Amino acid sequence: QVQLIESGGGLVQAGGSLRLSCAASGRTASSTTMGWFRQAPGKEREFVAAITWTGGTTYYAASVKGRFTISRDNAKNAVSLQMNSLKPEDTAVYYCARRDRSIIITATQSYDYWGQGTQVTVSS
């Protein structure tokens, strides 16, 4: 059983920063990709960023590239998302996800495990 628990969401003004964390527990896999997704009200869940567990390769959605940074802590089995220069359109529930392959894929259906989500609200 794999569990992903997100933390760090909240309310911030436009231009501010937040750091999300995702703690993973349970069965581990030799090839893993960790991703962050978000879902705004009335919209589909969309890819934000991902990182491969072993090589540390990263990939970002165009809308967040240059503002968000994904990182991993192998010792703590955790992944973080540092979000800077936040905009009102970044407001969404952010989800941590895991894929038991070492190739980054942006499609939600390619991820095997999901956290419960954490709310991020950016006020203008």
Image (cartoon, rainbow, N blue to C red):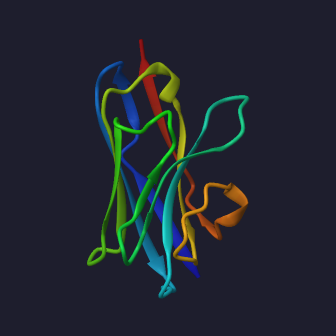
Q: Position of residue 116 (x, y in %)?
A: 57, 55
Which quadrant of the figure contains the C terminus?
top left
Which quadrant of the figure contains the N terminus?
bottom right
Q: Position of residue 8 (x, y in %)?
A: 36, 46
Identify the residue at horizontal 44%, vertical 36% (top origin): 64
Identify the residue at horizontal 50%, vertical 33% (top origin): 63
Asked if residue 108 is positioned above or below residue 111 in the image, the reply reads above
Asked if residue 19 is positioned above or below residue 113 in the image, the reply reads above
Asked if residue 64 is positioned above or below residue 8 in the image, the reply reads above
Q: Nearer the viewer, residue 111 or 55?
A: 55
Q: Position of residue 31 (x, y in %)?
A: 50, 82
Identify the residue at horizontal 46%, vertical 27% (top origin): 121
Say left or right for 84 vs 94: left
Q: Nearer the viewer, residue 58 or 113?
A: 58
Q: Nearer the viewer, residue 20 or 50?
A: 50
Identify the residue at horizontal 32%, vertical 27% (top origin): 85
Asked if residue 96 is positioned above or below residue 90 in the image, the reply reads below
Say left or right for 6 vs 1: left
